[in-house]
């Protein structure tokens, strides 16, 4: 099937923010006696939303994992993270240009495990917020990646916004991701996937249809030709 829409991930795909998330997690967990190792975060936790990360880490350390505590930790981490992001431009080189090229040809949406305020801040600072017809964030779904909830929601909402006839199908949407959890979520939703190996190794992204070093090094026309040839 021809591609009719493109749905992006944010952290690690468009924005070079995974290290900032890692540092913010540790900043709020240290007072609770928890320190995440860098290798552990990038090999095991990357791609998951804040709630699921905090819940997992607290359980593993046999700490109380009440909703109230997790909510407090999320609020603290959000404050630390947003203060850092507000001071800098965090998009990967070439990411904004790639988004603009895609937006000239396809409707775009974004599915992220981050909070809406964080996503809006990054996209507005990069002056690309208006290119996305819809944004699905952690607040919008019950289950984060690798569950397909976010992608399912984005596909349904895009189809509703565009009033597409025939209806938009998952197989007509290309997801752009950077983690195994994100790839799994998109696959379970029924999508094709382009992965960019900017935060984890290419070998960890082998389940994607395509793996490229970065968006700056991705030829959209080439991908579309390959997908068309496979149909």
Image (cartoon, rainbow, N blue to C red):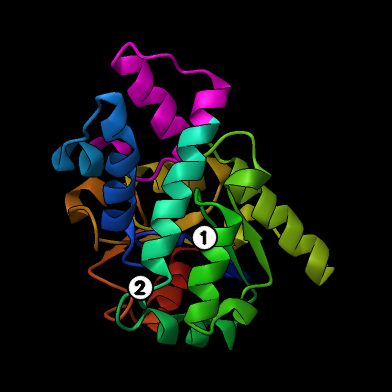
Residue 149: image quadrant is top right
Q: Is residue 145 left or right of residue 25?
A: right
| Residue 104 can be seen in this image | yes
- Label 1 to label 2, Cα distance in Å? 12 Å
Circle 1: element type: helix
Residue under the image location 16 percent in, 37 percent down:
37
Tell me the tag on residue 196: none
| Residue 145 can be seen in this image | no
11, above or below 153, in the image? below
Q: How crowded is the residue under tag 1: few (<14 C-alpha within 10 Å), some, or many (20+)?
A: some
Q: Can residue 223 be found in the magenta stretch?
A: no
Image coordinates for residue 219, horizontal then vertical, percent: 35, 82
Residue under the image location 33 percent in, 48 percent down:
24
128, above or below 63, in the image? below
Residue 97: image quadrant is bottom left
Q: Is residue 191 left or right of residue 92?
A: right
Image coordinates for residue 92, horizontal then vertical, percent: 31, 75
- Asked if the residues shown at circle 1 and circle 2 are in contact, with their CB atoms under 8 angstroms apart, the answer is no
Q: Is residue 109 left or right of residue 40?
A: right
Q: Is residue 14 left or right of residue 154?
A: left
List the residue tagged with mark 2: 90
List the residue tagged with mark 1: 118
Image coordinates for residue 190, horizontal then vertical, percent: 56, 47
Q: Residue furthest front?
A: 31
Residue closer to the observer: 228 or 162: 162
Residue closer to the observer: 2 or 86: 86
Which stretch did the figure color magenta?
Answer: 44-70
Circle 2: element type: loop
Q: How crowded is the residue under tag 2: few (<14 C-alpha within 10 Å), some, or many (20+)?
A: some
């Amino acid at each position: 099937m021809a591609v009719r829409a493109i749905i992006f991930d944010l952290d690690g795909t468009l924005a070079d923010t995974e290290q900032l998330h890692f540092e913010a997690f540790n900043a709020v967990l240290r007072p609770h006696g928890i320190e995440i190792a860098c290798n552990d975060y990038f090999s095991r936790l990357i791609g998951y939303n804040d709630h699921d990360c905090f819940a997992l880490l607290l359980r593993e350390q046999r700490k109380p994992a009440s909703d109230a505590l997790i909510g407090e930790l999320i609020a603290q981490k959000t404050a630390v993270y947003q203060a850092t992001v507000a001071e800098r431009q965090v998009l990967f080189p070439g990411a904004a240009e790639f988004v603009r090229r895609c937006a000239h040809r396809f409707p775009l949406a974004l599915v992220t495990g981050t909070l809406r305020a964080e996503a809006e801040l990054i996209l507005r600072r990069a002056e690309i917020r208006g290119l996305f017809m819809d944004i699905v964030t952690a607040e919008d779904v019950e289950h984060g990646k690798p569950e397909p909830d976010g992608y399912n929601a984005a596909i349904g909402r895009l189809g509703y916004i565009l009033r597409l006839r025939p209806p938009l199908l998952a197989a007509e949407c290309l997801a752009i991701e950077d983690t195994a959890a994100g790839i799994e979520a998109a696959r379970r939703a029924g999508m094709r996937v382009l992965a960019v190996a900017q935060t984890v190794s290419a070998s960890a992204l082998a389940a994607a249809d395509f793996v490229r070093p970065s968006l700056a090094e991705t030829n959209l026309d080439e991908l579309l030709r390959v997908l068309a040839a496979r149909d």
